[in-house]
Image (cartoon, rainbow, N blue to C red):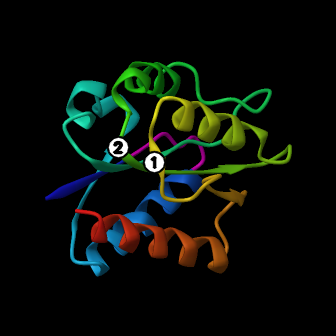
């Protein structure tokens, strides 16, 4: 079964995290499907029980508003019982956008693989890459 890893990345940092999650899924025996947010739709994702979403912090610590935010909004009513990993990078702030995003998903009934998501300051360092791969393996075990 394919596990979608959907992301939006402006600088490549969140894309690098998505690639690490995908590697973890493959290492865990699953099949990862990397998708940019513009190529994903909520109805298709809702058919999956396990998926990952990645987005960096934008503006005043919020999700990217033209592609990722509309996707997340469409997913919220469909998220109950889904196993979801959230991840992303940031360049300022303290991770508030991820905490807010995780809270929204939990309130919608999603089961988060990482309670507050995985965040990296700027480019993901070795620890963030390892955590992304480990979380990808955990996702593969859920299928």
Q: Position of residue 111 (x, y in %)?
A: 45, 48
Query: Does residue 57 appear in the picture of this structure?
Result: no
Determine whether 63 is above or below 74 in the image. below
Q: Residue at x 54, y 38 (%)?
A: 106
Question: Which quarter of the picture shows residue 55?
Answer: top right
Question: Which element carries disc 1, helix, strand or loop?
Answer: strand
Question: Which quarter of the rendered picture does the C terminus lie within?
Answer: bottom left
Question: Which element carries disc 2, helix, strand or loop?
Answer: loop
Q: Which residues are magenta?
A: 6-11
Question: Which quarter of the picture shows residue 136?
Answer: bottom left
Q: As drawn, is 19 to the left or to the right of 35?
A: right
Q: Residue at x 29, y 33 (%)?
A: 40
Within 10 Å of disc 2 (Cα), the crowding (few <14, some 14-19, many 20+) is many
Distance (Cα) linking label 1 and label 2: 6 Å
Name the residue tied to disc 1.
Answer: 111
**How many badges with numbers are in the image?**
2
Q: As drawn, is 60 to the left or to the right of 34?
A: right
Q: Position of residue 85 (x, y in %)?
A: 47, 53
Q: Position of residue 98 (x, y in %)?
A: 67, 43
Name the residue tied to disc 2.
Answer: 82
Q: Are marks 1 and 2 in contact (CB under 8 Å)?
A: yes
Question: Which quarter of the picture shows residue 118?
Answer: bottom right
Determine whether 1 is above or below 59 in the image. below
Within 10 Å of disc 1 (Cα), the crowding (few <14, some 14-19, many 20+) is some
The secondary structure that most of the magenta stretch takes on is loop
Question: Which quarter of the rendered picture does the N terminus lie within?
Answer: bottom left
Q: Nearer the viewer, residue 9 or 99?
A: 99
Q: Position of residue 35 (x, y in %)?
A: 31, 44
- N-term mark: 1 or 2: 2
Q: Residue at x 57, y 21 (%)?
A: 65
């Amino acid at each position: 079964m394919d596990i979608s890893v959907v992301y939006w990345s402006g600088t490549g940092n969140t894309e690098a995290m998505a690639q690490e999650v995908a590697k973890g899924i493959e290492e865990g025996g699953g099949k990862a499907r990397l998708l940019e947010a513009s190529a994903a739709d909520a109805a298709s994702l809702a058919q999956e029980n396990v998926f990952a979403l990645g987005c960096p912090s934008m503006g005043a610590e919020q999700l990217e508003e033209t592609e990722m935010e509309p996707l997340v909004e469409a997913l919220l009513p469909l998220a109950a019982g889904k196993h979801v990993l959230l991840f992303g990078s940031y360049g300022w702030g303290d991770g508030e956008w991820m905490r807010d995003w995780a809270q929204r998903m939990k309130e919608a009934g999603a089961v988060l693989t990482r309670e507050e998501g995985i965040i990296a300051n700027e480019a993901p360092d070795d620890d963030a890459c390892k955590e992304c791969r480990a979380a990808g393996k955990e996702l593969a075990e859920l299928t």
